[in-house]
Amino acid sequence: MEQSSKPFLSKNNPLNMSIDDGEKFSFNYLLPIYWFTWLLIFFSFILSYSPKFFRSLLGSLVGTLIYHFNNKRRNISKKNLSLCFKKMSSHDLNNLCKAYFSYLGKTFIDLPLLWWRSNLSLQSQCQIINSEYIDNELSRDRGVILLTAHSVSLDFGGRSLSKYPIISMYKPFRNKLLNWFIGKSRSKSTDNVVVFPRDNFSFKKVIKALKSQNIFYYVADEDLGKDNSVFENFFDEPKSTLISISKIASLSKASVLPCINHYCPITKKYITFIDKPINGFSENDMEKNAKLINRALEKNIKRNLEQYMWSLRLFQTRPDDRKYPYE
């Protein structure tokens, strides 16, 4: 039986976990099976120190190639857009889809920055808007749940917020070397962070941590099936919506602040936008809570529609007998 993945954590972390409890480098990663991965890692190092204009041009090219040749992702994106915006013309839908893949390509090419550059260098390329909302809640000696969505620059949001004590989750890669290499960049020595694998996540530890001045960075827009979910409209289409966040907020008394990440082509910085706290979560009415969550997500996604991750299977779990949309 394959062993579960471990968390990535900095020496100082919100749960006071031992660094020995986290993922570590294995000498198995030096075996021939991983040599091609090492070659890609070396290429990512070169890319991380290449000029910004070169990365931007290469990213645009990569995005264009994905749009034209990855039929699966293009069709999923168009289907999601047509479900979410039923009144959108086919012309506008196609333009939005192309813009999305352009940003997807650019952000993909920028990811090596997170893996190789120092925290100081990365912070100069990131900006938090409305950080006072976080500071105000923490000053009241309570935890904060940052409710976010899958924007193309999601990982840059984690880096911009790294000055805070953060708990978050990751989906492990099948390639163990790649999983270790990317995971360690999410827990730099200057951080105060624990990043749990999704398959080995402890809600009890998070609830306990949120009873003091810690932050849970939570991506709330995934479709993970019908368990712990209710159906609520996401734009124009019913979507399986996770309700666990309202339960965590209720048990921990933490504040829930929506946020979103995007790249600003004017300032050439990765922006993390923090919104005002969500009020009105019910202890019993999960449909009401799902509505509050989705309205908050929609509001922030609309700030930069073309930078939301439209190529995810957002509607794979269907209400009633509705047809599976991704053929």
Image (tube, rainbow, N blue to C red):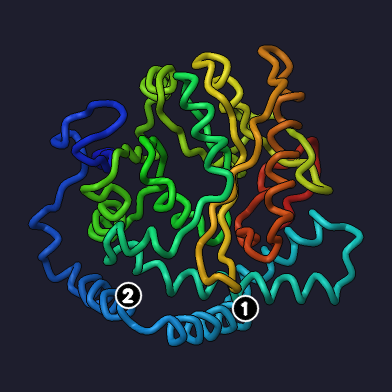
Which residue appears at 71% of the width and 61% of the height? 305
Q: Nearer the viewer, mark 1 or mark 2?
A: 2
Does the rendering let one see residue 317? Answer: yes
Q: Is residue 310 left or right of residue 270?
A: right
In the image, residue 325 lies at what x, y percent?
Answer: 74, 55
Residue 27 image-quadrant placement: bottom left
- Quarter where residue 281 is shown: top right
> Label 1 amino acid?
Tyr
Label annotation for residue 67? 1
Q: Amino acid at mark 2?
A: Ser
Residue 142 percent coordinates (x, y): 47, 20
The numbered mark, 1 or 2, whose residue comes first in the sequence reads: 2
Answer above or below: position of 254 versus 231. above
Q: CA distance from mark 1 to mark 2?
A: 24 Å
Q: Residue placed farthest to the left in the image?
A: 27
- As drawn, is 327 to the left or to the right of 21? right
Q: For the residue labelled by badge 2, is the local secondary structure a helix, a strand or a loop?
A: helix
Say the numbered circle drawn on residue 48.
2
* Residue drawn at x 23%, y 41% as measured from the top left: 10
Which quarter of the picture shows residue 278?
top right
Taking the image as shown, residue 137 lies to the left or right of residue 159, namely right
